[in-house]
Amino acid sequence: MSSKRSIFEEVSETGDKRPEAQTGLIDKTSSGKTRTGARRGIRAWLMVLFALVVVMIAVGGLTRLTDSGLSITEWRPVSGALPPMSEAEWQSEFEKYQQIDQFRIQHSWMELSDFKQIYWWEWGHRQLGRAIGLVWALGFFGFLAVRQIPAGWTGRLLLIGALGGLQGAIGWWMVHSGITQGEGITSVASYRLAIHLGLAFVILGFIAWYVYLLGRSERDLMQARRAKEAKQFGMATGLLHFAFLQILIGALVAGIDAGRTYNDWPMMAGQFFPPNAFPEPQMWRNFFESPGLVQFIHRIVGYLLFAFGVVVWLRGRRSAHTATRFAFNAVFAALIIQMLLGIVTVLYAAPVQVAILHQFMAVVLWSLILRARYLSAYPVVTSIRGNTKGGAK
């Protein structure tokens, strides 16, 4: 029978010690050691990658607008990193370009000096792709070597690299569609351009999402997840998919220079539906190759996207969290600007400066929708005094 204990007796005197509460179990490895990893360092590295991909999208757009994409007719991932180093090499590259349909039909007026201008655009575009791959590899394998990747993040970071490699292959697949002889083709296939641009936005989306997640600790994210606003999250997800569809259609417009036709608004050649919208005998080809039909679809989807954006914004304003409401306000503001830029692009026949600004604004809108979606899933709780718990960085 155990002896009686005084209610004033120190617990430590009995030898009956209670186990200490353990924290940070989300970051425990199988060996029981804490592995939080270099979250800030990885986040900074991903932000650099994000900026590089944004620049890559802009350079890709300028390469398309300047008709430079077919100037390099071969895919040499390693040796192609060096540009022509002598006049003989420049002449050799120019002769290769002279053999394809784009030069014969569209650029037969070019001299070597003119060719050099479009060559540098495409070379810079490919060089930037190599730089992005190098930055990813150095960062990923560097953090992996020093064992600073947080638990559960290796696969995510590897996914970005895999998608980047796939993007390079799709880029050549796209370019190859325009390198023809005797087929009368002067540009890349528009649907391949859409796939190429779409994957760029997918990569950008993953990077942005990971940057948002790494801005807060795992413990804070788990706590914030309990306050998830499912309705706002679902509507932001729908808006994200809708915007992605519009981005793909925009790529189809760019692929066939549809923005430089029917340059009136809100009508098209004075009527609601453009004339001669189905010039191709094969019906399905018109949805990819008819400038009037493709631009009409882009306009209608834009109107529907804006209308749905208003609904999402009104729902987002009902959020209980200040940061979430602000995020949805930012999405709506970006949506208005993007719509106005689209109208200006059409009215002025897609000048390079306006067209590239329209494409850049799509990146901004895409990122802001992702942020609103993220804050709907992981709200930043604001206290009565206005202090935030676990700031969204």
Image: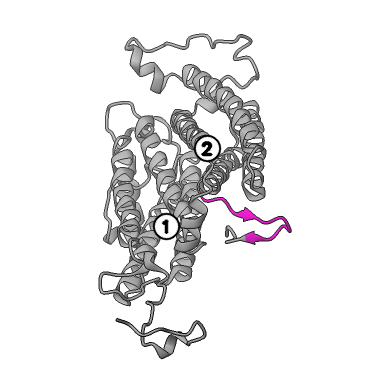
Is disc 1 placed on a helix, strand or loop?
helix
Q: Going by the image, does 66 lie left or right of 139?
A: right
Give percent across and percent down for residue 277.
47, 12
**Residue 306 location, quadrant:** top right
Q: CA distance from mark 2 to mark 1?
A: 32 Å
Q: How many marks?
A: 2
Residue furthest toward the right?
A: 385
**Residue 264 location, quadrant:** top right
Q: Which residues are magenta?
A: 378-388
Tell me what residue is drawn at x 51 percent, y 45 percent: 228
Q: Going by the image, does 242 lie left or right of 2?
A: right
Q: Which numbered marker is on residue 148?
A: none
Give percent across and percent down for residue 162.
29, 53
**Residue 82 location, quadrant:** bottom left
Is disc 2 placed on a helix, strand or loop?
helix
Q: How is the image coloured?
A: one colour
Instruction: Identify the residue under disc 1.
Output: 128
Check residue 381 for magenta coloring: yes
Mark 2: which amino acid? Ala
Instruction: Identify the residue under disc 2.
Output: 236
Q: Is residue 120 above or below residue 136?
A: above
Give percent across and percent down for residue 216.
51, 62
Foreground residue, 73 or 129?
129
Q: Is residue 326 above or below residue 301?
A: below
